[in-house]
Image (cartoon, coloured by chain):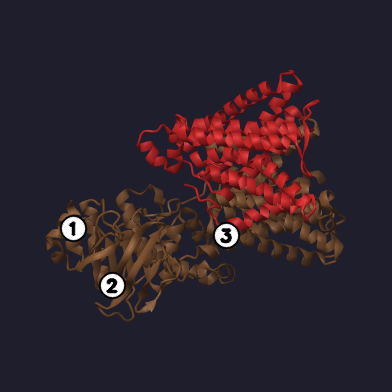
Chain colours: A brown, B red
Amino acid sequence: MDYFYHVLVMFCLYAILATSFNVVIGLAGLFALSHAAFYAIGAYTTAILTTAYGVPVFVAMAIGVVLTAAVGAVAALPALRVGGHYLVVVTLALQVIVIDILRNAQGLTGGPDGISGIPRIVLFGQSLSTPGSFLVLAAIVATAIYFALRLLAVSPFGRALRAMRENELAVQSVGKNVVALKLIAFALSAGTAAIAGSLLAHYIAFVSPQSFSIDETILVLAMIILGGTGNLFGAVVGAFILVLLPEILKFLDLPVGTADLMRNAFYGLMLIVILRFRPEGLFPERYRYTLPAEAEQAAGAFQLTPLANFENGAVTLAGENLHKNFGGIVAANGIDIELRAGLVTGLIGPNGAGKTTAFNLLTGFLTPTSGTITLRGRPITDRRPHRIVHSGVARSFQDLKLFRRMSVLDNVLVAFPNQFGDKLHNVYFRPGAVAAQERANIARALEILEFVGLRERASQEADGLSYAEEKLLVIARLLATEAEVLLLDEPLSGLDPNTLARVLPIVRRLAAQGRTVCLIEHNLDVIREVCDVAAYLDGGRVLTIGRPEELMKDPQLLERYIQ
Amino acid sequence: MDLILQLLANGISNGSQYALLGIGFGLIFGTTGIVHFAYGPVFAASAYVMWWLIAALGLPFPVAVVLGMAFAAGFGVLAYLVIYEPLVERGSPSFVVLVASLGLFIVIANTLAIVFGTDAKTLPDFSYGIYFLGDVVVTGVQIAQVLVFMAVALALSAFLKYGTWGSAIRAVTDNVDMARIVGIDTRKVAIVVFAIGSMISAIAAANLLVREGASTHIGFFAVFYAFIAVVVGGVGSIRGAAIGGLLLGLVESTGMWKLPTEWQSTIAFLVLFVVMLWRPTGLLRGN
């Protein structure tokens, strides 16, 4: 019976590892391979503190968790600058360094022999020295962690993580701080792995480097892939299957060494087969969900939030003498532009004229080589994109950058400003306030979707939309930011007349209610219809600016543009 | 002073091996964008195959190396066609391809251990000379490692510059979509780079076989060092991978001046960590 309990304890520990790893891999989309290293740091910290320094068990475990979270945050530092494959190699290096230290720092870690004689956990006067008694604790901790991480996954914070996974630029364009998101995701995931590690140390009363090799990371990865990336329940199921399966293999009469090798080879084969035939795993992440009825009822007609003090025609966002060089290429060569409240400004000009570069400079996605950007007279030149969104300037992208593997509703929800649930401490300590605001936001998101004509699609996956619907969703997402200055990169190109007839009034209405609107557009008829002011860009600067009709009378300009 | 010169010589020799592994891996990674983790086990498998050809069949070393290279090329191409291509064709995110390559990595690595056992396989009665350059002692293998690396690097550069497939490979490395538009068969290019990259790894495997034999862990460290060399040097640049590998060898070796041997790889990875923070695109930017 003890043997059976032991298998269940290991299942609990792997469930903790798999769910916490899934936060980084599945939700945040950060491909790190150092989970076993965090598991190790948690285990060794408590092992060293309790055996060598006599620190009480729970204090030592807590120190291990905090320390590991800190190491996780440091490991995330390169991830802030580099993505994808670079993160893989850096985290792999971290894994190798940690194992090297465990093996070589003999005095501290006991070297290859590890540390034995780690004290048992004593709870309510009982020493948890048998698998049966330890199972109770392991099950409670694993369950608590599962629900805590699930709460995170469905919170606005978890939504921001998924949005970051889908598109890192777009998530900044709706005001999220990707640096903070990554650091917190890493630290949280590492700290949680350390909980599993410290439990392991006190459970088997022994730690050695062999328990934390890169194979462990791959095993936990296999659990996630099998269960379903981005689905925490799937990770638990994956852990269950992969902990149990080798136990069944034990009934086959194989030599011990060969059995281990065959088991590992089997994990590898399973990874390949799953990715080939069911890449989403046993329990795919769900993108649709049922809308809460009360939010449906609460949704009324969409009204733009009135601006406190706006003066029609006053300059809001202005760029002065903006230059941008990439190596030898000059993308912006002294752009001067002033956008005014209540007016729609159109940017026209040939490809490569610097229109999108102007947007990137104005919204902080590019830092100008020289020049200044001001919002209502205050400089915002060096602010990072999410801070500029908080100041009230939001933009869309020509290639849309939707959060594809998320619901249409989530695409809008993620963009609302000042969400309590974006802060992790609110998710856990003010769940009521978060839930109330979430209900109100869902109602408001439905209003916005109704306004652009996507209400019917709210609970569907964004990936399944038609092109016109995608462009409408981009506008809905932009509206949700509540920004007063809206920069739209080719919102109208490629639209059929019906959709165009739906979008044009939206643009006009935004301006009528005091928003500053700027859009990039190639179609001169559309410019004439919707814009109050048009600016003609070429060669990285604004050549002419004026009323569209006047601009289009300029024969020289017309000729250059149409050629 | 003698010690430093000795460490530099060791560093250049080891660095040449890392650089050799790096250019093979970098060619595959830079051209196809696939993080071919199984590069390591393919390298290890060809070392075992060469060992078997020599120790069991009694073939001469050069013949075994040529056959080992052919084996590696076939294995690498097979990995691409059977594992990676179907996933890439389906438009899987690069993370999926990466996990698949990890899967392939552990399948091959563990199969090798089952087939060949976990003990080290060394070549019987293989002797090489020891030479003195002033006070610096170098072995024949160390010199061979440097010469082999230089020969392969020059041959690869010449091939990329003048070879039939060279310009196509450079075009794909530069811009896949554009290469496709001008009618380059990107599938064939991928097959060619997998073949050449794997062959280069087999040459490195021959070096290792002579120096210390084949054992179960060589695959992981081969791909890991290769990956680091490429990332430190700059993805998409063969010269970068070569410089990255040499640098890695030198840093690792000179670290031993003041620190005990067992810390050498830790030092190297810390250097990588700092480089990634300071210059994420690598020392030499890829073209």
Q: Residue at x 47, y 53 (%)?
A: A166
Q: Tell me which corner region of the image, top left, top right, bottom left or bottom right, holds residue B183.
A: top left
Depth check: A438 or A64 in front? A64
Chain at tag 1 = A
Q: Residue at x 34, y 78 (%)?
A: A376
Are there few (<14), some (14-19), or many (20+) residues within 10 Å of tag 1? some
Q: Tell me which corner region of the image, top left, top right, bottom left or bottom right, holds residue A359.
A: bottom left
Q: Nearer the viewer, mark 1 or mark 2?
A: 2
Q: Which amino acid type is shown beneath numbered disc 2?
A: Glu
Provide the residue designation for mark 3.
Answer: B278
Task: Give residue A524's mark.
Answer: 1
Q: Which amino acid type is shown beneath numbered disc 3?
A: Trp
Depth check: A191 or B109 in front? B109
Local SS, label 1? helix
Mark 2 on the same chain as mark 3: no
**Residue at far right of view:** A117
Q: CA distance from mark 1 to mark 2?
A: 21 Å
Depth check: A450 or A418 in front? A418
Q: Nearer the viewer, mark 2 or mark 3?
A: 3
Q: Nearer the viewer, mark 3 or mark 1?
A: 3
Tell me whether the residue at label 1 lies in contact with that at label 2, contact meaning CB atoms closer than 8 angstroms: no
Task: Give residue A338's mark.
Answer: 2
Q: Which amino acid type is shown beneath numbered disc 1?
A: Leu
Image location of residue A347, percent across then percent down:
25, 62
